[in-house]
Image (cartoon, rainbow, N blue to C red):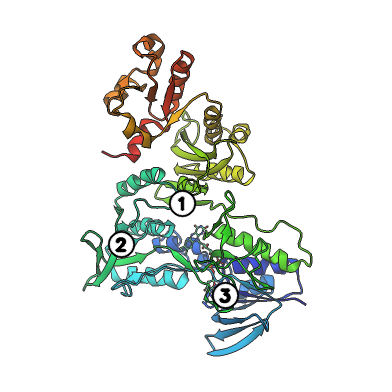
Amino acid sequence: MKKVVIIGGVAGGATAAARLRRLDEKAEIIMFEKEEYISIANCGLPYYIGGTITDKNELTVQTPASFNARFNIDVRNFSEVLSINAKDKNVLVYNKKEDRKYTESYDSLIISTGAKPVIPSLDGIDNKKVFTLRNIPDTYKIKNYITENNLKSACIIGGGYIGIEMAENLKNLGLDVSIVEMSDQIIAPIDYDMASTVHSYIEDNGINLMLNTKLLSIKDEDIGVTINLSENREIKADIVILSIGIRPDTSLAKNASIALNDRGYIITDNKMQTSIKDIYAVGDAIEVTEFVTKTKATIALAVPANKEGRVVSDVIDSENYTKDGYNGTQGSSILKIFNMTVASTGVNEKTAKRLNLNYDKVFTYSPSHATYYPGATNMTIKTIFEKQTGRILGAQIVGGEGVDKRCDVLATAIRFNGTANDLVNLELCYAPPFSSAKDPVNIVGYVIQNLLENKVKNFHWHDVAELINRKDITLLDVRTKYEFSRGHLDNFINIPLDDIRARIDELPKSKPIYLTCHIGHRGYLASRILTQNGYEVFNLNGGYRLYKTIIKD
Ligand code: FAD
């Protein structure tokens, strides 16, 4: 009978335990968890604090007793594994409840110890009004502190997923909320141009967003704290949530001489095997292969942890494992901010640039469903693709309804190495309440196809500054007179799309035309007319609308 020991009883660990049992009714499976709770809904924690989830019990998908009853797993909570003895194949365990240490042997060991919040060593960081959020005890601490002290204001340090979710939830509780973010944008998986829309939206929802701002120290006050920031700024808040990132919880692995990367993440192969035989690792604690680029990456998300948990069980169960193993993480992720949805998958432009990929990008702006059916909202999609092949490398979407569905379709296309042609060929479900006959994902395919087939040439929002003072080109805005009068880019002349054929002689053939419209579509139509009349034309991708969301006067 196989004996499998698992360290960590949440996403990766509990998934591995349950799958192993389904595969092998006889195996002895012991799962150690140092905290009280196992199989917790980490992703739901901010929503319990904010009151959307009201029942505490909803935060635990399984209890030790229910997990044991269903899967016959020997769950030992309050049990911290202190060390791994790889030579003798056992672990040293501290039972916190009984204040007792003992060793437990294993045939196979799975490490799923996750990650810990990064806590910088700054003055006042250990203040009792400063909290981090990782597990259920953290959640209760924050929730109790808020309700018992009648708080009025909160400062979130860090504009990542947890920070933004906490900002929304605390705002919904009626607190004044500030977000302090060191970089020039929040939500690192998306690019600055896509984050710009989110910045305005967050501010419109009453959150004080402080970009390019560094936390320096925290000073205790009778009520709340004073938070000292870069450039001699300071703000006051009753509570601080520190969410500046995570680091892998891998000291056990390190002390057992398991190979780690230079950032302390456990290195595994695609069968989740570490550098030591019979020791496996999954979840936030490990380095992964990024699916699109095949480079090494660290991506802390629940979906990969669950998938790796399944792979490791299959590997341990099978004498002769022949499947492909874990084939990489593409970082598909999604975030709700009030009524906005932000989703991304695959490679963003920052990464494409850093890795010097031969990529291009398109911005498309599409309604969530047929506009004649009430309630449609628009979404901006940024798609990164490989220039030679049209292969989709990554996508980011900001909008409301239907963002999740489109990002999932694009994530699927990426998984199957799909190209722009594949997006064009996708036949997706359509009726007016759900989509349009040309789904936003089809539109992405059409736009990339047009580019690759030279039906249109693009320029981008970041090219505008260099173009507006050039005398050797024509700058043309093809929106209506009314739209143009409400705001336009410097030095652009206006000939509305529907007048172009009649007024074409006003445009000198000797000069290339750089044109814009509102979202890029009319620009494309104008560009087709002009190109077929012998002009060289470039269309502002994403149009005036996108430009104005990024470049604010
Ligand atoms: P965890 O799930 O963190 O489990 C590790 C467990 O190991 C912990 O319970 C820990 O106590 C235990 N442990 C550590 N050391 C020992 C030891 N020595 N002995 C015994 N036990 C030990 N991901 C998404 O994809 N979508 C989301 O919306 C999302 N929202 C999130 C919101 C929050 C607030 C948080 C904190 C995370 C969120 N995540 C989300 C990330 C997701 O929860 C993690 O990627 C996932 O839980 C990682 O799984 P894991 O098994 O590696 O680690």
Q: Which quadrant does the N terminus fall into?
A: bottom right
> Which residue is drawn at the image coordinates 29% and 73% (left, top)?
124
Density class for disc 1 (Cα within 10 Å; few <14, some 14-19, many ≥20) is many
Residue 155's tag is 2
Pair 2/3: label in front: 3
Secondary structure at badge 2 equals strand
Residue 402's tag is none
- Which tag, 1 or 2, sits closer to the chain's start? 2
- Please, what is the three-letter code of the amino acid marked with disc 2? Cys
Q: Nearer the viewer, residue 425 or 403?
A: 425
Mark 1, residue position: 189
Q: Position of residue 341 (x, y in %)?
A: 45, 47
Density class for disc 3 (Cα within 10 Å; few <14, some 14-19, many ≥20) is many
Secondary structure at badge 3 equals helix
- Which tag, 2 or 3, sits closer to the chain's start? 2
| Spatial CA span between label 1 and label 3 | 28 Å
For residue 214, what is the image quadrant? bottom left
Pair 1/2: label in front: 1
Q: Nearer the viewer, residue 89 or 442?
A: 89
Q: Position of residue 308 (x, y in %)?
A: 63, 62
Q: Position of residue 348 (x, y in %)?
A: 48, 47
- Please, what is the three-letter code of the amino acid marked with disc 3? Ala
245 horizontally vs 293: left or right = left
- Which tag, 1 or 3, sits closer to the chain's start? 1
Mark 3, residue position: 253
Q: Is residue 447 above or below residue 339?
A: above
65 horizontally vs 517: left or right = right
Q: Position of residue 368 (x, y in %)?
A: 49, 36
